[in-house]
Amino acid sequence: MRPETKAELIAVGSLDIEPSLLGKITVPTAGPGAGKTAFFFRSGNQRVRLALNKDSPLKAVADGDEIVIMRDGKEVARGQIEDELIHCPEQAYINMTEKCIFDCKFCPVPKLNGKVKTIEEVLGLIEEANATGKMKAISITSGVDESVEKEFERAMKVINAVKKYGVPIGVGVYPTADSNRRMKEAGVDEIKYNVETMDRELYGKVCPGQDMEEVLKALKEAVEIFGKNKVCSNFIIGLGETDEAVEKGIRELVSLGVVPILRPASKHPLREGEVFIERPSKERLLKLTRLLRKILDENGLRADLFKTMCLPCTGCDMNPHTDFCEDED
């Protein structure tokens, strides 16, 4: 699947497909896409996660053992539906807490008021994933039920209990004063603290009550403790930021040693009227991801070296290295 094809699929973000053609599907419980039924489509070495939507301009038909994605009667891509392990293929990627005390305007999680998994439930899910023989990584993320500190302590209990599996561990939670040091000492391999947007004026509007500078400080320290190509951050595209602001934000994150993940914004009915969202077009995704690739290469950072969380999955984003040819300018 060429970059242009994947960018088109991500820009639409959904597919009209008969449920009988799907394997195991789930409803994401974290981030802007929470609450929507989604599945993975794989073509060659690329994969994309699409929401199930009868009104999508992309239509799927079966052709033997392949799924063909059509648009306006023309073939866009063909491949297979890829089964998830937990949340994504090959990873036990678990959201411990499906609710949040924060009120990020692009995120439906605070409105969904979902479940808080017990430590025993989380460990049980990971054991089941390991028993399949397909688990290549463990990734832990979480909303915030009562406090950032309490959520981090819950994550630490999980981390300490799953080291025995001997696979890479990635953690994406809200940082605390000593979270980097403690996670490194506990054997965590990779860290993800999300900036959400690098437009500071916009940040104050879409992430009220939070401090971007504290997140950036935690990211900088994480790079110092975990090292190069071990720290990443979601950077949402489509909240009204300009391309110039995106470039400035990418350069700031990369200067800290952080690999940005350009995450297309998703509209959710529970946030209607609270936030401006315009899902980036195919052209904008390609332009910004090529820019990201260039800046990463200039600074010796790689998006294809991560073993956990979003970067190796690549379902929701354009990975600037694995989704683009090595000889591309």
Image (spheres, helix red, strand yellow):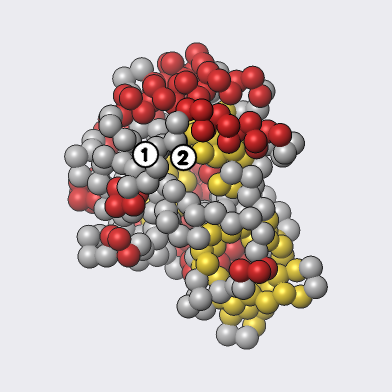
Give x and y (percent) for residue 69.
Answer: 64, 73
Amino acid type assigned to the residue bearing label 1 in the image: Gly
Q: CA distance from mark 2 to mark 1?
A: 7 Å
Q: Is residue 169 visible?
A: yes
Report the front residue among 300 and 193. 193
**Residue at position x 70%, y 70% in the image:** 67
Above or below — where is 14 with respect to 132?
below
99 displayed left or right of 85: left
Q: Is residue 191 visible?
A: no
Give x and y (percent) for residue 43.
Answer: 70, 61
Amino acid type assigned to the residue bearing label 2 in the image: Asn
**Residue at position x 52%, y 32% in the image:** 122
Q: Which mark, by number, is residue 95?
A: 2
Badge 2 vs badge 1, beta-carbon distance below 8 Å: yes
Q: Which mark, by number, is residue 143?
A: 1
Report the front residue among 63 and 242. 63
